[in-house]
Image (cartoon, grey):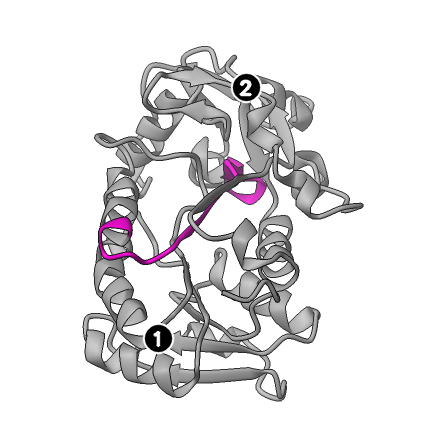
Amino acid sequence: MSEAPFKSFAIVGAGPRIGIPIVKAFLAIDVPILVIARPSSTNTSALPDDDPNLKVVRADYTSASEVTKILRENKVEVLISTVTLVFGGVLVQNVLADAAKEAGVKLFVPSEFGTAPPATGLAHEKHDFAVYAKSIGLPTLRVYNGLFHEFVPWLTTLTETGKFHIVNKGDMPGSFTAIPDVAGYVAHILTTQPPSRLLDVEVRIEGQRATLSEISTLYKGSVPVVHCDALPTEGVVAAEFRMLLQRRFEVGGGSCGWDPETGIDDAGLARKDNSLWEGHHWLTVGEVLGL
């Protein structure tokens, strides 16, 4: 395989959280990208309609033949997936992988964008997909960035309750990275790094390392901070998922340096691939949340 950077990119699951920002990051550096949207998706309305580097097509993600045809016709080298975990989107990635393999896609970037998933328990579906992709010989690039800065109010139910809820002490450090930084990083490394640096690789980035208790102090008393055994559930969508995520933070699993097999966190490992975006200023939680 040539060591020239990849030139042809497509994305599936381009939603408002990380997918649309990744698309915009490609457009910002004047690189063409193909968006494969579901037939009923309205997320594409957030994209510019006059950028010559943007092409939008629609396909049924559960139809491998339909997706294969699109990928082949557009000579896609790299397929990025940003389908959601919370609402079951990750489960369709096997179909997307089959389509990518059949179409000759050289690299699949699965929907990770968190920390290394364990073989069982929370987010095990992501681990299962990595195993499947390897079994069919489809190279992957897995991006670990910890929790998005923007998701802190969601994780702590501040958005719904007006209170910053921390399950137990909240004194274990985790990795936090801003959505624009993650999106820009993905576009940057895919368009600048040689394939040998990307194929079957896990990259770990970290915009800021902090505990939830430390982040709560950024609010300077403007919101109540509540340490609790369990998160409130009334009016809180996916409360159980959020609580499980906070409990993972408790044991160090909120860090990009966390090894789910050994349960050990390596702070140096958590940001080892920040260096691939030389000279970049990584946003802090305070900068993003206006604190």
Front-most of 24 and 74?
74
**Element type where label 1 sits in the image:** loop
Camera sees residue 291: no
Q: Is residue 76 above or below residue 248?
A: below
Give the residue drawn at x 62%, y 52%. Answer: 185
Give the residue drawn at x 30%, y 46%. Answer: 130
Which mark identifies residue 41? 1
Q: Is residue 283 above or below residue 224?
A: below
Left or right, 9 with respect to 5, comes to left
**Magenta segment boundaries in residue numbering:** 134-152
Residue position for label 2: 173
Q: Is residue 184 above or below residue 149?
A: below
**Res. 125 image quadrant:** top left
Give the residue drawn at x 50%, y 15%. Answer: 172
Q: CA distance from mark 1 to mark 2?
A: 37 Å
Under mark 1, the amino acid is: Ser
Point out the image quarter for the C terminus: top right
Front-most of 195 and 249?
195
Q: Are marks 1 and 2 in contact (CB under 8 Å)?
A: no
